[in-house]
Image: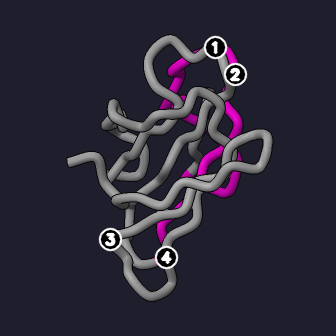
């Protein structure tokens, strides 16, 4: 799962548990509160999620065509686009939000 602390690590709150294997979490540098959650193969639903409220709620990228997501990077010239890498070297360029 994914955990968040707001007090320097004294306490932790689980903010996501979407499957057995979470790969990572990535912040959008130009969208405060936006966090991307990536999942490894075998995720129950989809392998890419977005929270717009620091992990309180999550929106799936249901149309994302890959099941083994690794990293997310925001396009430095267009905050409405992201680049997503998959295991094996593929790169996807698409919208920063599934909505």
Q: Nearer the viewer, mark 4 or mark 2?
A: 4
* Left or right: 31, with 10 as reference point: left
Residue contact between numbered discs 3 and 4, judged by CB atoms under 8 Å:
yes
Residue 80, numbered label: 3
Residue 36, position as x, y percentages in the image = 49, 49
Q: Residue at x 54, y 29 (%)?
A: 14
Mark earlier in primary sequence (4, 1): 1
Up the image or down, 16 lies above or below 7; here it is above
Q: Residue at x 40, y 58 (%)?
A: 94
Badge 1 element: loop
Work out whether residue 55 or residue 36 is closer to the camera in this orientation and state it.
36
Mark earlier in primary sequence (1, 3): 1
Residue contact between numbered discs 4 and 1, judged by CB atoms under 8 Å:
no
Residue 69, position as x, y percentages in the image = 63, 38
Badge 2 element: loop
Work out whether residue 4 or residue 45 is closer to the camera in this orientation and state it.
45
Residue 90, numbered label: none
According to the image, label 2 marks what residue?
21
Badge 3 element: loop
Mark earlier in primary sequence (4, 2): 2
According to the image, label 1 marks what residue?
42
Residue 32, position as x, y percentages in the image = 38, 70
Q: Residue at x 50, y 11 (%)?
A: 44
Color encoding of the figure: one colour
Residue range corresponding to the magenta coloring: 6-29
* Left or right: 47, with 89 as reference point: left
| Alpha-carbon span between mark 1 and mark 3 | 28 Å
According to the image, label 4 marks what residue?
75
| Alpha-carbon span between mark 3 and mark 4 | 8 Å
Residue contact between numbered discs 1 and 2, judged by CB atoms under 8 Å:
yes
Badge 4 element: loop
């Amino acid at each position: 799962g994914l955990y968040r602390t707001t007090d320097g690590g004294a306490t932790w709150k689980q903010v996501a548990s979407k499957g057995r294997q979470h790969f990572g979490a990535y912040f959008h540098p130009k969208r405060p509160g936006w966090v991307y959650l990536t999942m490894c193969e075998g995720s129950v639903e989809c392998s890419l999620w977005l929270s717009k409220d620091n992990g309180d709620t999550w929106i799936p990228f249901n149309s994302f065509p890959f099941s083994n997501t690794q990293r997310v990077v925001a396009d430095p010239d267009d905050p409405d686009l992201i680049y997503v890498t998959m295991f094996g070297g593929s790169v996807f360029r698409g919208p920063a939000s599934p909505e």
